[in-house]
């Protein structure tokens, strides 16, 4: 195996080390308990401060979760992060990769919306 290929395989494996799909081995949508346990309290956002998925949440995910969870990625079929319903299903379990408090706050506000 060429050194460049080996290095890429190592980096690709380690880049997603904290993701729950590595440890869980199951589809995110299969766990209804995870959905309810990870939802933030309904009062954490206001109606006037709507959080937009494509303008505010998706850019965070693209920065933190590429290339695995986006089109062509190795776990895209199981957990596509370009879909808001996937993010709502995972809830705060995403915080294994999203560490910045301001990004976590924004995602919690998004999850609290109907």
Image: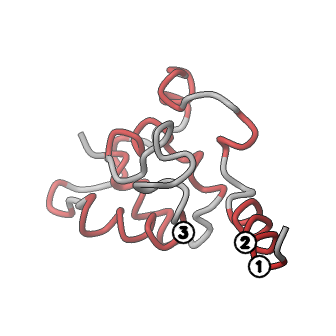
Q: What mark, if any, has residue 91 been given in the picture?
A: none
Q: Secondary structure at mark 1?
A: helix
The Cα–Cα distance between marks 3 and 2, rounded to whole angstroms, is: 17 Å
Residue extending farthest to the front is 1
Tell me where residue 68 sits by quadrant. Answer: bottom right
Please name the residue that numbered disc 3 is placed on.
Answer: 64
Please name the residue that numbered disc 1 is placed on.
Answer: 4
Judge depth for marks 1 and 2 and give the one in front: 1
Q: Residue at x 82, y 74 (%)?
A: 2
Q: Secondary structure at mark 2?
A: helix
Q: What mark, if any, has residue 8 been given in the picture?
A: 2
The Cα–Cα distance between marks 3 and 1, rounded to whole angstroms, is: 23 Å
Residue 63 lies, in percent from the top left, at: 48, 73
Tell me where residue 93 sits by quadrant. Answer: top right
Q: Residue at x 55, y 45 (%)?
A: 75
- Location of the C terminus by quadrant is top left
Q: Residue at x 63, y 61 (%)?
A: 97
Residue 104 lies, in percent from the top left, at: 50, 63
**From the viewer's perspective, is 20 left or right of 65?**
right
Q: Secondary structure at mark 3?
A: helix
The image shows residue 100, relative to residue 111, as above or below, that is below
Residue 60 lies, in percent from the top left, at: 43, 69
Circles 1 and 2, Cβ within 8 Å, touching? The answer is yes
């Amino acid at each position: 195996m060429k050194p460049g290929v080996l290095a890429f395989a190592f980096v690709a494996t380690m880049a997603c080390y904290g993701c729950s799909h590595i440890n869980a081995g199951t589809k995110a949508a299969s766990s209804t308990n995870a959905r309810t346990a990870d939802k933030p309290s309904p009062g954490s956002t206001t109606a006037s401060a709507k959080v937009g998925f494509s303008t505010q949440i998706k850019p965070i995910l693209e920065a933190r979760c590429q290339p695995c969870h986006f089109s062509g990625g190795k776990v895209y079929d199981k957990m596509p992060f370009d879909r808001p319903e996937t993010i709502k299903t995972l809830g705060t379990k995403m915080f294994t990769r999203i560490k910045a408090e301001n990004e976590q706050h924004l995602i919690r506000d998004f999850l609290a919306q109907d």
